[in-house]
Image (cartoon, rainbow, N blue to C red):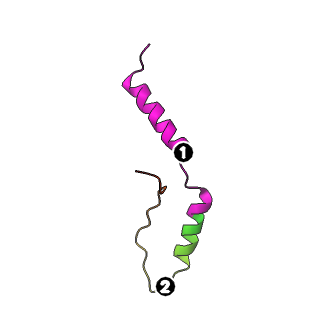
């Protein structure tokens, strides 16, 4: 039996998320860095993603 496009997409998404390498600790470290900046600096945006992400 052939898989449907939806099933193929679901499998691809599950594989992608199972390999995610950004941990809660990584996010916490970045937040700690941001809140420790001098008050005269404004951090408007932070974007995190795995380095291996295409």
Q: Quadrant of residue 22?
A: bottom right
What residue is shown at x 51% (from left), y 38% (from top)?
Answer: 15
Q: Helix, strand or loop at disc 2?
A: loop
State which quarter of the image contains the N terminus. top left
- Depth check, front residue: 16 or 27: 16
Q: Position of residue 27 (x, y in %)?
A: 56, 62
Answer above or below: position of 5 versus 39.
above
Q: In the orientation shown, which residue stands out farthest toward the top?
A: 1
Give the magenta-colored segment's residue range: 1-27
Q: In the orientation shown, which residue stands out farthest toward the right?
A: 25
What residue is shown at x 44% (from left), y 66% (from top)?
Answer: 46
Q: CA distance from mark 2 to mark 1?
A: 37 Å
Q: Helix, strand or loop at disc 1?
A: loop
Q: Position of residue 33 (x, y in %)?
A: 55, 74
Badge 2 local density, few (<14 within 10 Å), some, or many (20+)? few
- Depth check, front residue: 18 or 6: 18
Majority secondary structure of the magenta segment? Answer: helix
Q: Position of residue 47 (x, y in %)?
A: 43, 62
Task: Select label 2 or label 1 by which is in front.
Answer: 1
- Depth check, front residue: 6 or 1: 1
Q: Quadrant of residue 31?
A: bottom right
Answer above or below: position of 42 versus 15.
below
Determine contact: label 2, label 1, CB under 8 Å: no
Residue 48 within the magenta-colored segment of the rendering: no
Badge 1 local density, few (<14 within 10 Å), some, or many (20+)? few
Tell me: 7 left or right of 30.
left
Q: How many marks?
A: 2
Q: What residue would you read off at disc 2?
A: 39
């Amino acid at each position: 039996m052939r898989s449907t496009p939806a099933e193929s997409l679901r499998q691809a998404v599950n594989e992608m998320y199972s390999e995610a390498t950004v941990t809660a600790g990584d996010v916490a470290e970045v937040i700690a860095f941001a809140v420790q900046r001098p008050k005269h600096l404004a951090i408007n945006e932070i974007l995190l993603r795995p380095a291996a992400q295409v």
